[in-house]
Image (cartoon, rainbow, N blue to C red):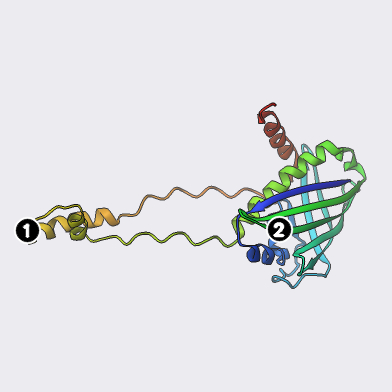
Protein backbone atom coordinates (compact mmCIF):
# COMPACT_ATOMS: atom_id res chain seq x y z
CA UNK A 1 0.00 0.00 0.00
CA UNK A 2 1.17 3.53 -0.69
CA UNK A 3 0.42 6.66 1.34
CA UNK A 4 1.20 10.30 0.65
CA UNK A 5 1.58 12.81 3.45
CA UNK A 6 2.90 16.38 3.70
CA UNK A 7 3.43 18.98 6.40
CA UNK A 8 5.07 22.38 6.81
CA UNK A 9 7.65 23.34 9.42
CA UNK A 10 8.10 26.98 10.40
CA UNK A 11 11.88 27.04 10.48
CA UNK A 12 14.89 27.86 8.32
CA UNK A 13 15.56 25.30 5.54
CA UNK A 14 19.10 24.63 6.80
CA UNK A 15 17.83 23.89 10.31
CA UNK A 16 15.17 21.48 9.04
CA UNK A 17 17.62 19.66 6.76
CA UNK A 18 20.10 19.32 9.63
CA UNK A 19 17.33 17.79 11.76
CA UNK A 20 16.83 15.08 9.13
CA UNK A 21 20.48 14.07 9.66
CA UNK A 22 19.74 13.27 13.31
CA UNK A 23 18.27 9.76 13.52
CA UNK A 24 17.91 9.92 17.30
CA UNK A 25 15.92 13.14 17.00
CA UNK A 26 13.61 11.76 14.29
CA UNK A 27 12.94 8.60 16.28
CA UNK A 28 12.27 10.63 19.42
CA UNK A 29 9.69 12.74 17.56
CA UNK A 30 7.71 9.71 16.35
CA UNK A 31 5.24 8.54 19.01
CA UNK A 32 5.77 4.91 19.94
CA UNK A 33 9.23 4.68 18.36
CA UNK A 34 12.52 4.31 20.19
CA UNK A 35 16.03 3.02 19.73
CA UNK A 36 16.49 -0.54 20.95
CA UNK A 37 17.54 -0.54 24.64
CA UNK A 38 21.31 -0.64 24.99
CA UNK A 39 21.87 1.04 21.62
CA UNK A 40 24.27 4.00 21.84
CA UNK A 41 22.48 7.21 20.83
CA UNK A 42 24.09 8.22 17.52
CA UNK A 43 25.17 11.81 17.02
CA UNK A 44 23.65 13.73 14.10
CA UNK A 45 24.92 12.27 10.84
CA UNK A 46 26.62 9.22 12.36
CA UNK A 47 23.84 6.71 11.64
CA UNK A 48 23.26 7.61 7.98
CA UNK A 49 23.60 4.53 5.78
CA UNK A 50 23.96 2.11 8.70
CA UNK A 51 21.48 -0.34 10.22
CA UNK A 52 19.66 1.18 13.18
CA UNK A 53 18.01 -1.16 15.73
CA UNK A 54 14.53 0.20 16.41
CA UNK A 55 11.49 -0.52 18.56
CA UNK A 56 7.91 0.53 17.88
CA UNK A 57 5.11 -0.02 20.39
CA UNK A 58 1.44 0.24 19.44
CA UNK A 59 -1.88 -0.30 21.18
CA UNK A 60 -5.26 -0.97 19.61
CA UNK A 61 -7.82 -1.43 22.34
CA UNK A 62 -6.83 -4.57 24.28
CA UNK A 63 -4.17 -5.51 21.71
CA UNK A 64 -0.62 -4.38 22.38
CA UNK A 65 2.29 -5.03 20.05
CA UNK A 66 5.99 -4.30 20.26
CA UNK A 67 7.80 -4.36 16.93
CA UNK A 68 11.56 -4.86 16.85
CA UNK A 69 13.64 -4.48 13.71
CA UNK A 70 16.15 -2.50 11.72
CA UNK A 71 15.98 0.77 9.82
CA UNK A 72 18.31 2.65 7.52
CA UNK A 73 18.41 6.34 6.65
CA UNK A 74 19.82 7.57 3.32
CA UNK A 75 20.12 11.21 2.24
CA UNK A 76 20.69 13.08 -1.00
CA UNK A 77 22.46 16.27 0.05
CA UNK A 78 22.10 18.02 -3.33
CA UNK A 79 18.36 17.40 -3.68
CA UNK A 80 17.65 17.63 0.06
CA UNK A 81 15.68 14.42 -0.09
CA UNK A 82 16.09 10.93 1.28
CA UNK A 83 14.41 7.79 2.53
CA UNK A 84 14.00 5.69 5.62
CA UNK A 85 13.53 1.97 4.99
CA UNK A 86 13.12 -0.84 7.46
CA UNK A 87 11.36 -3.96 8.62
CA UNK A 88 10.18 -5.20 12.00
CA UNK A 89 8.31 -8.07 13.64
CA UNK A 90 6.09 -8.45 16.67
CA UNK A 91 6.61 -11.99 17.91
CA UNK A 92 3.58 -11.85 20.20
CA UNK A 93 1.12 -11.43 17.31
CA UNK A 94 3.42 -12.83 14.61
CA UNK A 95 2.96 -9.65 12.59
CA UNK A 96 5.60 -8.39 10.18
CA UNK A 97 5.89 -4.88 8.78
CA UNK A 98 8.16 -3.75 5.97
CA UNK A 99 8.25 -0.36 4.35
CA UNK A 100 10.05 2.68 3.02
CA UNK A 101 9.30 6.37 3.56
CA UNK A 102 10.73 8.71 0.91
CA UNK A 103 10.79 12.41 1.69
CA UNK A 104 11.77 15.68 0.03
CA UNK A 105 12.15 19.18 1.48
CA UNK A 106 10.98 22.26 -0.40
CA UNK A 107 11.44 25.84 0.94
CA UNK A 108 8.25 27.89 1.16
CA UNK A 109 7.33 31.33 2.37
CA UNK A 110 6.01 29.85 5.63
CA UNK A 111 9.07 27.66 6.18
CA UNK A 112 9.77 24.23 4.71
CA UNK A 113 7.29 21.80 3.18
CA UNK A 114 8.09 18.14 3.75
CA UNK A 115 6.44 15.78 1.25
CA UNK A 116 6.45 12.05 2.03
CA UNK A 117 5.52 8.90 0.12
CA UNK A 118 5.27 5.72 2.17
CA UNK A 119 5.18 2.19 0.74
CA UNK A 120 4.58 -0.65 3.18
CA UNK A 121 3.29 -4.19 3.64
CA UNK A 122 1.81 -5.86 6.73
CA UNK A 123 1.43 -9.61 7.20
CA UNK A 124 0.21 -11.60 10.15
CA UNK A 125 -2.47 -11.13 12.80
CA UNK A 126 -2.60 -7.32 12.70
CA UNK A 127 -2.92 -7.25 8.92
CA UNK A 128 -6.69 -7.37 9.43
CA UNK A 129 -6.51 -3.78 10.65
CA UNK A 130 -4.65 -2.56 7.56
CA UNK A 131 -7.68 -1.53 5.53
CA UNK A 132 -6.79 1.44 3.38
CA UNK A 133 -9.23 3.92 4.94
CA UNK A 134 -8.21 3.12 8.49
CA UNK A 135 -4.48 3.19 7.72
CA UNK A 136 -4.77 6.53 5.94
CA UNK A 137 -6.62 7.98 8.93
CA UNK A 138 -3.97 6.71 11.33
CA UNK A 139 -1.15 7.94 9.08
CA UNK A 140 -2.68 11.41 8.96
CA UNK A 141 -2.77 11.69 12.74
CA UNK A 142 0.64 10.10 13.23
CA UNK A 143 2.21 12.48 10.71
CA UNK A 144 0.62 15.43 12.48
CA UNK A 145 2.03 14.37 15.83
CA UNK A 146 5.47 13.80 14.34
CA UNK A 147 5.42 17.23 12.68
CA UNK A 148 4.30 18.92 15.92
CA UNK A 149 7.05 17.20 17.91
CA UNK A 150 9.72 18.04 15.35
CA UNK A 151 8.57 21.65 15.15
CA UNK A 152 8.97 21.95 18.92
CA UNK A 153 12.54 20.63 18.73
CA UNK A 154 13.73 22.86 15.91
CA UNK A 155 15.69 26.04 16.67
CA UNK A 156 13.22 28.83 17.25
CA UNK A 157 13.58 32.32 15.81
CA UNK A 158 14.90 34.68 18.51
CA UNK A 159 12.13 36.47 20.33
CA UNK A 160 12.06 40.22 19.82
CA UNK A 161 13.99 41.95 22.57
CA UNK A 162 11.89 43.80 25.08
CA UNK A 163 12.08 47.57 25.04
CA UNK A 164 14.43 48.85 27.76
CA UNK A 165 12.54 49.70 30.90
CA UNK A 166 12.97 53.31 31.87
CA UNK A 167 13.52 54.22 35.45
CA UNK A 168 10.71 55.82 37.36
CA UNK A 169 11.86 59.43 36.77
CA UNK A 170 12.18 58.97 33.01
CA UNK A 171 8.78 57.30 32.85
CA UNK A 172 7.14 60.20 34.64
CA UNK A 173 8.95 62.75 32.48
CA UNK A 174 7.83 60.99 29.30
CA UNK A 175 4.28 61.21 30.57
CA UNK A 176 4.61 64.98 30.94
CA UNK A 177 4.53 64.95 34.72
CA UNK A 178 6.76 67.44 36.43
CA UNK A 179 7.73 67.52 40.07
CA UNK A 180 10.35 68.90 42.33
CA UNK A 181 13.52 66.86 42.72
CA UNK A 182 12.64 65.34 46.12
CA UNK A 183 9.08 64.43 45.08
CA UNK A 184 10.26 63.04 41.72
CA UNK A 185 12.76 60.70 43.38
CA UNK A 186 10.18 59.35 45.77
CA UNK A 187 7.63 58.84 43.01
CA UNK A 188 10.24 57.23 40.74
CA UNK A 189 11.16 54.77 43.47
CA UNK A 190 7.52 53.74 43.73
CA UNK A 191 6.88 53.56 39.98
CA UNK A 192 10.18 51.93 38.92
CA UNK A 193 9.60 48.47 40.38
CA UNK A 194 6.02 48.39 39.07
CA UNK A 195 7.17 49.18 35.56
CA UNK A 196 9.91 46.54 35.62
CA UNK A 197 7.78 43.78 37.17
CA UNK A 198 7.62 40.77 34.79
CA UNK A 199 4.32 39.39 33.61
CA UNK A 200 3.21 36.20 35.40
CA UNK A 201 4.11 33.00 33.55
CA UNK A 202 1.63 30.29 32.68
CA UNK A 203 2.42 26.83 34.03
CA UNK A 204 3.99 24.51 31.45
CA UNK A 205 1.74 21.82 30.00
CA UNK A 206 2.43 18.25 31.05
CA UNK A 207 4.40 16.23 28.50
CA UNK A 208 2.40 13.61 26.62
CA UNK A 209 3.28 9.95 27.01
CA UNK A 210 4.82 8.83 23.72
CA UNK A 211 6.25 5.49 24.91
CA UNK A 212 3.64 3.73 22.77
CA UNK A 213 1.25 4.88 20.09
CA UNK A 214 -2.45 4.38 20.80
CA UNK A 215 -3.96 3.68 17.38
CA UNK A 216 -7.53 3.81 18.70
CA UNK A 217 -7.00 7.33 20.07
CA UNK A 218 -5.55 8.42 16.73
CA UNK A 219 -8.53 7.01 14.88
CA UNK A 220 -10.97 8.78 17.19
CA UNK A 221 -9.10 12.07 16.69
CA UNK A 222 -9.35 11.61 12.93
CA UNK A 223 -13.10 10.90 13.15
CA UNK A 224 -13.67 14.02 15.26
CA UNK A 225 -11.83 16.09 12.67
CA UNK A 226 -13.79 14.45 9.85
CA UNK A 227 -17.18 15.32 11.33
CA UNK A 228 -16.00 18.81 12.31
CA UNK A 229 -15.15 19.72 8.69
CA UNK A 230 -17.70 22.05 7.03
CA UNK A 231 -19.81 20.37 4.42
CA UNK A 232 -19.85 21.79 0.91
Q: Residue at x 16, y 53 (%)?
A: 176
Q: Earlier in the sequence, mark 2 or mark 1?
A: 2
Quarter location, residue 170: bottom left
Image spot of residue 2 (x, y percent): 86, 47
Q: Which residue is mark 1?
A: 180
Image spot of residue 8 (x, y percent): 66, 52
Q: Nearer the viewer, residue 194 or 82?
A: 82
Circles 2 and 1: CB atoms closer than 8 Å: no
Q: Nearer the viewer, residue 70 or 12?
A: 12
Q: Mark 1 packing: few (<14 Cα in 10 Å), some, or many (20+)?
A: few
Q: In terms of secondary structure, where does tag 1 sit?
A: loop
Give the side of residue 168 with respect to residue 208, left or right.
left
Which one is in front in this view, the residue at disc 2 or the one at disc 1? 2
Residue occupying the far top of the picture: 231
Give the side of residue 140 with respect to residue 173, left or right.
right
Q: In the rendered view, would you say 28 is above or below 46?
A: above
Image spot of residue 130 (x, y percent): 86, 40
Q: Which mark is residue 109?
A: none
Image spot of residue 163 (x, y percent): 34, 60
Q: Which residue is mark 2?
A: 106
Q: In the rendered view, would you say 9 is above or below 132?
A: below
Q: In terms of secondary structure, where does tag 2 sit?
A: strand
Q: Mark 2 packing: few (<14 Cα in 10 Å), some, or many (20+)?
A: some
Q: Nearer the viewer, residue 209 or 44?
A: 44
Quadrant into which the C terminus falls: top right
Amino acid sequence: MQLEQAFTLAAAPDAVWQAFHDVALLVDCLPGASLKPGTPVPAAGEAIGTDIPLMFKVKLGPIAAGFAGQGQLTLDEAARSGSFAGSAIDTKTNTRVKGEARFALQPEAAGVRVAMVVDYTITGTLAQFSREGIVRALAEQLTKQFADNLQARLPQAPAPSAAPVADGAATLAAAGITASAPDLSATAAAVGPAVAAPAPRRPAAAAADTSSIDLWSLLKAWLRGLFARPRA
